[in-house]
């Protein structure tokens, strides 16, 4: 893939990451904490995948922890400090959506505003790092 096409694709993923983070904020504001946490996870995942795509790498999977740990090239050092955020968001991928992922509770009953806000902050940190890295790489 050409460098121009890689950058274009990376920025498409970054735009969607921003939109997912905006959706997470809107959901948190109306008390949909499980859904807000899930969209925060999605924002972080797509932001990391944008960096992988800019590096012409294949960002397969949904684990943010893996995407950080296996980040290709020079970007690995830039994202290593975000591993704790990535791992925290990983824990939101399944149980925020499925009632059989939590004993006796639905996600709507289990997630709190504090958890949604923490997920928003974690995703925002990853998104800002991705935006900065892509800007510096351009």
Image (cartoon, rainbow, N blue to C red):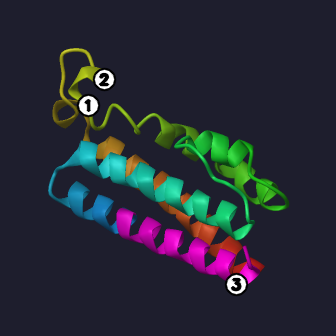
- Which residue matches tag 2? 101
**Mark sitting earlier along the chain (2/3):** 3
The mark lying in front, picked from 1 and 3, is: 3
Dots 2, 1 in contact, CB < 8 A: yes
Asked where in the image residue 95 lies, by quadrant, the reply is top left
The crowding category of the residue bearing disc 2, from other C-alpha atoms within 10 Å (few below 14, some 14 to 19, many at least 20), is few
Q: Residue at x 27, y 37 (%)?
A: 97
Q: Is 29 left, or right, of 77 in this rendering?
A: left
Is most of the magenta stretch helix, strand or loop? helix
**Left or right: 31 with respect to 48?**
left
Q: Mark 1 points at which residue?
A: 98
Residue 41 on image: x %, y %? 43, 49
The tag earlier along the polypeptide, 1 or 3, is: 3
Q: Is mark 1 on a helix, strand or loop?
A: loop
Residue 33 to residue 5: above or below: above
Quarter holding the C terminus is bottom right
Is 138 in front, or is 128?
138
- Whether 5 is among the magenta residues is yes
Q: What element carries label 2?
A: helix
Can you give x and y, in whole percent of width and height, for residue 116 in the image?
32, 47
Q: Give the range drawn in magenta.
A: 1-20
Label 2 – label 1 distance at C-alpha: 6 Å
Q: Can residue 84 be seen in this view?
A: no
User: Where residue 133 sits in the image (x, y, percent)?
Assistant: 70, 71
């Amino acid at each position: 893939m050409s460098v121009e096409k890689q950058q274009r694709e990376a920025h498409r993923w970054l735009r969607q990451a921003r939109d997912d983070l905006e959706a997470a904020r809107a959901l948190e504001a109306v008390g949909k904490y499980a859904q807000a946490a899930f969209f925060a996870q999605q924002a972080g995942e797509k932001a990391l995948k944008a960096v992988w795509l800019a590096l012409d790498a294949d960002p397969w999977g949904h684990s943010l922890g893996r995407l950080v740990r296996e980040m290709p090239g020079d970007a690995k050092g830039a994202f290593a400090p975000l591993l704790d955020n990535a791992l925290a968001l990983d824990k939101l991928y399944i149980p925020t959506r499925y009632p059989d992922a939590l004993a006796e509770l639905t996600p709507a009953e289990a997630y709190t505003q504090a958890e949604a806000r923490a997920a928003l902050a974690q995703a925002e940190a990853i998104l800002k790092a991705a935006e900065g890295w892509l800007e510096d790489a351009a």
